[in-house]
Amino acid sequence: MDADTVGLGRDDAVAPARGSSGTARSPDSPRRVVVVDDADGVRELLCLLLSTEPDFVVVGAAANGAEAIDEVVRTAPDLVLLDLAMPVLDGLGALPRIRRVAPYATVVIFTGFSEDALLDRVLALGADALLEKGLATGPLVDQLRRLCAARAPAAESP
């Protein structure tokens, strides 16, 4: 893997994250990110990549959907990068719960699967986008910036 490529249920009792991203934030504030992937190397690489960008700060990481929900509640991120195929609770199971606890966060499915039916399903469950693993790092970061800007609350706009 080269340095320019990232090669890579229902629970109504879950409460929304405190200090959720729906509050106005300074346009200069870095986006708070939670990275979720069961592959340690992929998760660590994404965390490292985003931590080198001045407009992102990684506030949490998780290896499965159950941990992801806990991290989202604990950290109230602006962006969640969520893998689909994971043990314990997969991304499809975690997605509606994450959307409930972080309604203003941008949720991006980051997966190795690329089916049109999958895109329709994750969008219906509340994801903002589906990005395929293997995207070069520059385009990946640019796409994440665009997705976050598109979802930004009105109070954040200039």
Image (cartoon, rainbow, N blue to C red):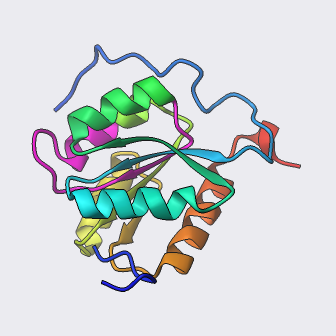
Does residue 88 appear to the left or right of 35 in the view shown?
left
Q: Quadrant of residue 153?
A: top right
Residue 62, given in percent of the width and then of the height, sits at: 30, 42
Pick the residue in front: 59 or 16.
59
Residue at x-position 26% and y-position 75%: 114
**Is residue 89 within the magenta segment?**
yes
Residue 129 visible to an observer of this rendering? no
Does residue 145 appear to the left or right of 39 in the view shown?
right
Residue at x-position 63% and y-position 47%: 31
Number of numbered discs present? 0
Residue 79 visible to an observer of this rendering? yes
Q: In this rendering, is residue 133 above or below 73?
A: below
Does residue 2 appear to the left or right of 105 in the view shown?
left
Q: Quadrant of residue 154?
A: top right
Residue 79, given in percent of the width and then of the height, sits at: 52, 47
Residue at x-position 52% and y-position 37%: 77
Q: In this rendering, is residue 32 above or below 20?
A: below
Q: In this rendering, is residue 150 above or below 125?
A: below
Q: Residue furthest right?
A: 158
Residue 141, given in percent of the width and then of the height, sits at: 56, 69
Residue at x-position 60% and y-position 33%: 21
**Is residue 26 within the magenta segment?**
no
Q: Range of the magenta residues?
A: 76-97
Does residue 13 appear to the left or right of 98 in the view shown?
left
Residue 84, given in percent of the width and then of the height, sits at: 23, 56
**Considering the image in quadrants, where does the N terminus appear?**
bottom left
Q: In this rendering, is residue 22 above or below 16?
A: below
